[in-house]
Amino acid sequence: MEKPLTHSSSLIKLKGVGPKVQEKLSKLGLNNIQDVLFHLPYRYEDRTQVIPVAALRHGQSCLIEVTVNHASIAFSRKGKSRRMLLVQVSDATGSLLLRFFYFNKQQQEKLVEGVKLRCFGDVRYGASSLEIVHPEYTLLNDTNNAEMENSLTPVYHTTDGVSQILLRRLSEQCLELLNNKSLLPDYLNESLLKLDDYYSLSDALKYVHRPPTGANVNQLFAAQHGSQLRLIFEELIAQHLSLQVLREKNRHKSASKLHSDNHLLFKFIKSLPFELTVAQQKVNQQILQDMESGIPMMRLLQGDVGSGKTVVAALACLKAIESGWQAAIMAPTEILAEQHFKNFTSWFEPLGIKVVWLSGQIKGKKRSQVLSQIIAGEAQVIVGTHALFQNDVEYKCLALAVTDEQHRFGVQQRMALAKKAKITIENESDTLAHQLIMTATPIPRSLAMTAYADLDYSVIDELPPGRKPITTVVIQQERREEILQRIHKACAEGKQAYWVCTLVEESETLQCQAAQDTAETLQKVLPDIKVGLIHGRLKSEEKEILMRDFKNGLTQLLVATTVIEVGVDVPNASLMIIENSERLGLSQLHQLRGRVGRGEQASHCVLMFKSPLTEHAKERLAIMRKTNSGFEISRKDLQLRGPGEVLGTRQTGLLQLRIADIVRDEYMLGDVKLASAKIMADSPEKVKALIDRWVGVAQQYVNIG
């Protein structure tokens, strides 16, 4: 007798799933019945009612019933090779065009005058009327009058070889299995759910996958229906638990206890040409306490552009060095890593501290020499890129790992560096380096405490005294001549400027070519100004020479791609032009703008844009003009783009949420933390099950066994 299906049963047990289909489904993380049930729709289509053609609007997705008036073959303007099937259709209220770029002879023979169709698709403006490109359609006749859908149609995330139709069929089968009450364990009781409307897990899943006719569409699209809130709450709990488990795992590991008299630290502070801000001093005390505890420090240091995070990181490094250990500083790009190398070398060499540089570009004998210095302990501070945690890099006694621009790395990458401490403490097999994770992407506290729940949280919330706010102006591209005059005037006064080129294309080659063309044009129109060019395809040595010339004032105008977003610090540069600024997100614009305003003189940022602007682009540029506050900009950026993009999709793997949205659902986070704590205390056996259910593929980060 065949065993009844459970939530962990393989999808092979379902109708229509063979080994090949299963292989494709696994790419979506769908391996069992529970996976399908929790692969939730990200939007809905309303196919429950027919819309008259006269009522259609551009951008609308809708169902229509029409009659074919005539069909013809046409060729696209791009050449005779691209054929199109154009089908003119109408109902009693009006007409529109159905356009097919891909079609076969059988379709062409069936779509003839007089045939009745039921179509679904996205309406758009055409050359002379509204049209739908590649609608889904069914032929209707007197004997075949297809039944209308009785629920909103779910739309799921897919992958190659997995269609919406397949996912709907599978979800339909799995939803039927939910009639067996024991199929899917419900780990949250009603008392844990701080919600007005109680939905059992099964009822919530049925509603979200197949909202019935008459469902409040606006409520569903806003993710405010009771069934959605039930699932959102559970997902946030699972996400929070996964990071708490990771935190607890690391708290049970050991780290070097760093005890010293802080003599190097005080000597360094005295050598600085400025005083530490109150915020820097406060954060420094938190870090020193962590490093003296013997428990691995896992601290997120957040601060706006120019707030002085690097100096605080230097103080942490000095604590490790004067205790007889090594420190490593990892940055995502060579330019940022090189900037750190220069800063730390200039700060630490007078103190007799050896700083070395390691990146993927260093090969052969030079690399072997650096690796030897690291394992011998001769290198006390090691600065570099991803190269720092490669297999062939062994540290003698690594105690501190500093990761800059955390959102550019995944958790696995920073943990790989922290685990390099495992070989350093005798008789301790489970050791980690202390971790200081820095980000200049300001994140609202509630989001930071959720997205980085495995970390302690520090913030430098004040800028050094004397920093003047940057004046930002927004100018149309047509006023380019005015901008050129402004650059000429600034350079004639001994100031320096950046010109940032942006492209929609992802191709780095195209971006570099655009920057090169711009640099050549600017040099022609500004012949008495020395123009430099920096982009991602240059060799490290070339970048270093270019940046040195710019910092020393030999180059007055630096043309660059967005490679200068982080890590460039030239106090005399007081003017920045960002071309096609409408193409960039708020956080990136803010990071770029932060390259100026580092000296005592007034600084300006010019955001050039090309009309027409989308509403989002208008809003972004208006925000940039209105405020210099990274925290305010970040809040707006989160509203416009969502946490996945702002934090970086590789942040943890855990923020690839299925139905929850940390910004939208922020009001739940307090109750989520209380419920999570109660589950960990009263029902620890549910923790792994909840994480398995919701976090799934990101389990590798948690590794709770």
Image: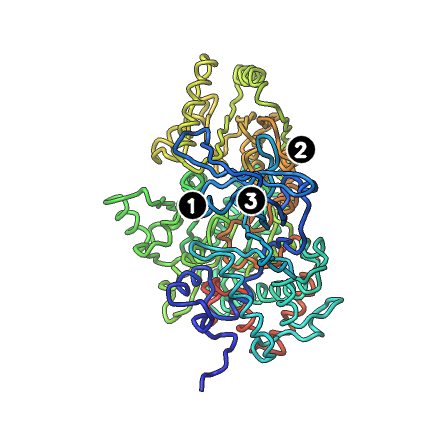
Label 1 or label 3, whichever comes before in sequence order: 1
| Residue 181 x/y as whole percent | 61, 79
3D distance between C-alphas at marks 1 and 2: 49 Å
State the scheme by which the image is colored.
rainbow
Q: Amino acid at mark 1?
A: Asn
When the figure is inspected, residue 588 is found, relative to residue 704, above or below; the finding is: above
| Residue 683 x/y as whole percent | 60, 78
Q: Nearer the viewer, mark 1 or mark 2?
A: 1
Q: Residue at x 34, y 34 (%)?
A: 539
When the figure is inspected, residue 326 is found, relative to residue 230, above or below; the finding is: above
When the figure is inspected, residue 74 is found, relative to residue 698, above or below; the finding is: above
Front residue of 646 and 44: 44
State whether residue 671 appears in this view.
Answer: yes
The residue that label 3 is drawn on is 440
When the figure is inspected, residue 499 is found, relative to residue 99, above or below; the finding is: above
Which mark, residue 622? 2
The residue that label 1 is drawn on is 104
Q: Amino acid at mark 2?
A: Ala
Q: Amino acid at mark 3?
A: Ala
Label 1 or label 2, whichever comes before in sequence order: 1
Q: Residue at x 67, y 33 (%)?
A: 622
Front residue of 187 and 587: 187
State whether residue 376 appears in this view.
Answer: no
Q: Element at badge 1?
A: loop
Q: Element at badge 2?
A: helix
3D distance between C-alphas at marks 2 and 3: 21 Å
Q: Quadrant of the N terminus?
A: bottom left
| Residue 216 x/y as whole percent | 72, 57
Instruction: Determine the image quadrant of residue 286.
Output: bottom right
